[in-house]
Amino acid sequence: MSENDNNKSTGDVEAENLAKNWSTLSRFEQGQRVKELVACGRSMRGLAKRIGTSEATIRKRVDLANFSPAEREAVESGKASVKGTLKKVRRKRAASAPRVPTDPEERKKFVEAKAQLTLCWIGEEIPMDEKAIAKLPAPERGSAREGILRYRIDVLEKTRDQPYFEWKAFRKPLQSRRVRLSRADPHKVIKRCKPKGEMGNTGPDHVNFWMTWFESWASGLIPHWTLRYDVLNRAIQLLEEEIRNPGHG
């Protein structure tokens, strides 16, 4: 605990020092320092606020820190511009980014993987309280487990049937095969996308909270709206199979 606190305070000190010395550092030095702090868990948004600059500037500096030695030398010698080199680097990154699968077999694998991710997420949020279930009379335990599974299904069905699937599809081309997927660890993405504030006290409050949360994390991990529909359908199907075959859940 104290070790974590020490790490936190060290990060704060480093961020403060970077903010103080920001104007005296070269763009590449700024980028390297930001990159190191981000690798230690600092957010770009938080660093931008601390330094007093825009998040876009912070992102540009990190991109500069990712230049190869040859690219950096070309920029520093004046043979290449920062703007042109950044464009080239971003084009390369975009070209290598994972995209929405279009091959039927790959699509099927993608749906299965994201359905399992969805079940992992909803299972943590609506857990199976085995200790509480174990205290129930034996004949009631199966019904209690089924009740929790059915509640998970209800949440996923409501999420699947929300009209945002339609209006988002028309508002921007989420069905485009050119849509890129997030490279980040999916579990970290989900955690980061959790809505701020309290969940609320009523059943509808809880469902709205989870629907908002799903929409937020799925926008980066399942950006194709019809794939989201398929993923939710598959997750619901797996939960229904678990109800039919409780021993295999």
Image (spheres, helix red, strand yellow):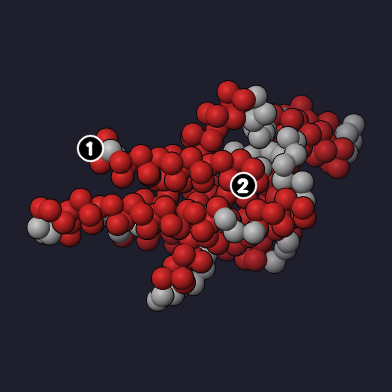
Q: In this view of the protein, which residue sits in the foreground, 145 or 100? A: 145
Q: Where on the picture, by quarter, is residue 43?
A: bottom right
40 left or right of 224 in image = left
Q: Residues within 10 Å of mark 2 (few under 14, many from 20)?
A: some
Q: Position of residue 19 (x, y in %)?
A: 64, 62
Name the residue at 73% across, 35% down: 177
Q: Position of residue 63 (x, y in %)?
A: 71, 42
Name the residue at 65% across, 66% down: 49
Q: Amino acid at mark 2?
A: Gly
Q: In this view of the protein, which residue sits in the foreground, 94 or 77? A: 94
Q: Is residue 17 visible?
A: no
Query: If the image is split into quadrants, where does the N terminus sit?
Result: bottom left
Q: Which mark is residue 247?
A: 1
Name the residue at 62% across, 47% down: 220
Q: Which mark is residue 152?
A: none
Q: Which mark is residue 220?
A: 2
Q: Where on the picture, by quarter, is residue 228?
A: top right
139 left or right of 84 in image = left
89 left or right of 109 in image = right
Residue 225, compared with residue 19, is above or below; it is above
Residue 90, compared with residue 218, is above or below; it is above
Q: Residue furthest bottom?
A: 201
Residue 150, compared with residue 64, is above or below; it is below
Name the residue at 33% across, 52% down: 149
Query: If the image is split into quadrants, where does the C terminus sit?
Result: top left
Disc 2 versus disc 1: distance between alpha carbons?
34 Å
Element assignment for label 2: helix
Q: Amino acid at mark 1?
A: Gly
Q: In this view of the protein, which residue sits in the foreground, 13 or 2? A: 2
